[in-house]
Amino acid sequence: MDRIEQPKLKELISAGEIRNRVSELASEILHDIQGDELIVIGLLTGSFVFLADLIRKFCQHPSLLGIDFLTVSSYGSKMHSSDNVRIDHDIRIDIANKAVLLVDDILDTGQTLQAVVHHLRQKNPEKIRTCVMLDKSEARKVDITADYVGFKISNAFVVGYGLDYDNRFRELSYIATVS
Ligand code: IMP
Ligand code: MG
């Protein structure tokens, strides 16, 4: 019988480090939004764990008006980014004249976030802030930075805390490199 291939994982960022950093990010964001009416938008699938932790730090905050998700085609099972970003499933919430916090798992080449920011701008939000858990700045192909970054990491493929390799390992509570 064929055994499922088991890639080697090496912990890069622990669950405790993630927890602390998410709290810090949430405080920074709440400080910056002041009285804005905020809509949080997550990019599926990778952002769902990070977003779930982050929004629970905004618990019952009067500024938080809603949460929605957007699906874009990205990696598939490959370890490199696609140059074309396609919106597969759009948000349903109205963001016109609202402040948006766009949340993703990782900023790699930057193409996904850039395309999604461009897409959301057509909906006339008052402002779009971007927040990513991880930033691989060495891999950047387009000129974009995130307003909030959890951790800057080197250019290695990582999994866990929502990030996958071939749809696996999203459930890890820590972030690991995979080889
Ligand atoms: P970008 O368009 O190249 O910035 O790619 C961003 C998307 O690629 C992220 O939302 C992730 O889904 C995926 N991605 C980039 N790097 C990694 C990685 O190291 N592990 C898992 N997914 C990644
Ligand atoms: Mg993604």
Image: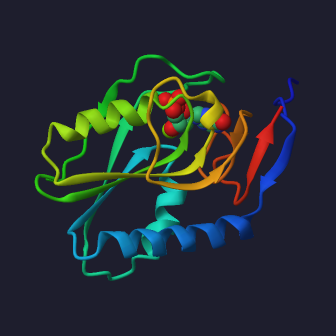
Relative to 72, residue 104 above or below: below
Q: Position of residue 115 (x, y in %)?
A: 34, 30
Residue sitting nearer the eye, 16 or 125: 125
Relative to 89, residue 176 above or below: below
Marker count (numbered): 0
Residue sitting nearer the eye, 140 or 79: 140
Q: Position of residue 56 (x, y in %)?
A: 45, 74
Quadrant in which residue 75 is drawn: top right
Indicate the colouring scheme.
Answer: rainbow
**The N terminus is located in which quarter?**
top right
Q: Residue furthest front?
A: 143
Relative to 178, residue 176 above or below: below
Q: Residue at x 11, y 56 (%)?
A: 97
Q: Residue at x 23, y 59 (%)?
A: 99
Question: Does 178 sit left or right of 22 as displayed?
Answer: right
**The C terminus is located in which quarter?**
top right
Q: Position of residue 28 (x, y in %)?
A: 46, 71
Residue 167 in view, yes or no: no
Q: Residue at x 86, y 29 (%)?
A: 3
Relative to 168, residue 139 above or below: above
Ligand 1, by image quadrant, is top right
Q: Position of residue 132 (x, y in %)?
A: 51, 50
Q: Residue furthest top?
A: 83
Residue 121 in view, yes or no: yes
